[in-house]
Image: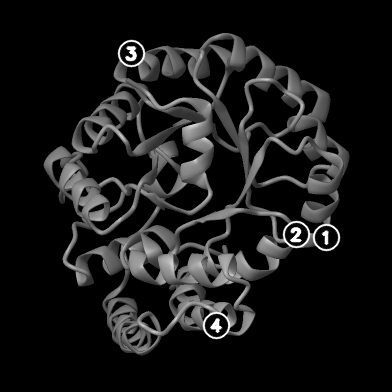
Amino acid sequence: MPLNEQAVQSKLRGVSAGLLTPFDDDTNIEHGKLASNARSLSDRGVDSFLAVANISEYHSLSQPERIEIAETSVSALPADASVLAGVGGSTGDAIELIEAYDDIGVDAMMIMPPDHTYLHERGLLEYYSTLGEATDRPLVPYVRGFDPAAQYLADLTTIDDIVAIKYAISDTTKLGAAVEAGADDVVWVNGLAEPMAPSMWIEGCEGFSAGVSNFRPEVGFALFDALTNKNWSRARRLRNICLPYQQFRDSRGTDNDIPGALSVPAVKKGLELAGLHGGSVRAPIRELTPSEERRAETLYQQLDEDIAALVDEPSTA
């Protein structure tokens, strides 16, 4: 039975890991490896999961594949884990996914960033309201890829079916203004991973989505504990040990000028180095080059050493 709204919110007040999609060399989905990753992360303490998400290569998946991945994720995880599944596109396509996810037992619908060229804030609010009418499961809009007004963000919090907002814009001043103006029963989640966790926490975020914590969740837990205990010095140090690998993720890679091109393959490489399953990627994402793989290995080794030195320190100030 799916978790209720309060339970979903409680899980989002923590570290939410993305479930990446392991593909074989022919880019077929390896569901056994996906399930194994989910169980391994659960065994390591993760209890909030983002399935069929951006980092899962949502836009390279067909509708049936999205449904199959959600089903694999829910089936692999314990009943008390929270699974948010990505929903997007046209209203009809989004409702098709929502209805399928309802049957599977997904706990909440993460509404993906709009992929339309032309947007209207009032139209987006109507879109979310329409999707909310299609399910009794809560909605979590993922705000990324456009620059909305703070008032729009505050208005999002007044839609009955929205229980949390994943905020993935680097403007923390706008975040603070939206939190102040919005309803106080919505959980704000930092969608830009560990590097932004301290600054977004101060502005009102109560949890964050994983970056390097997708494959080394203990660093995310340590960071969350430091923030909870207002140990700002320790939080900054934990943030800083994540930065080199995160900056590698954000880089453009070879023969490319678009930021973030290495994001998914870099995390998949991290999964492999941590003993989990990464797998290949689908176009338009590209694999790491041999030199990029070596760079990832060097950064992972440093991350491993830094985590060992910091994670076991007391979390209180």
* 10 Å crowding of disc 4: few (<14), some (14-19), many (20+): many
Q: What residue sits 53% from the left and 62% below the top?
A: 193
Write down the residue under mark 3.
103
For discs 2 and 3, the disc positioned in front in the rendered view: 2
The disc placed on residue 234 is 4
Quick one: label 2 or label 4, which is nearer the N terminus? 2
Q: Residues under labels 4 and 1: Cα distance? A: 23 Å
For discs 4 and 1, the disc positioned in front in the rendered view: 4
Where is residue 149? Give x, y as percent: 85, 43
Q: What's the residue type where badge 3 is placed?
A: Asp
Q: Kindly check if marks 2 and 4 are in contact, taking CB atoms under 8 A apart as contact.
A: no
Q: Secondary structure at mark 1?
A: helix
* 10 Å crowding of disc 3: few (<14), some (14-19), many (20+): few
Write down the residue under mark 1.
173
For discs 1 and 2, the disc positioned in front in the rendered view: 2
Q: Secondary structure at mark 2?
A: helix
Observer-nearest of 101 and 43: 43
Q: Kindly check if marks 1 and 2 are in contact, taking CB atoms under 8 A apart as contact.
A: yes
Q: Residues under labels 1 and 2: Cα distance? A: 8 Å
Q: What residue sits 84% from the left and 47% below the top?
A: 180
Write down the residue under mark 2.
203
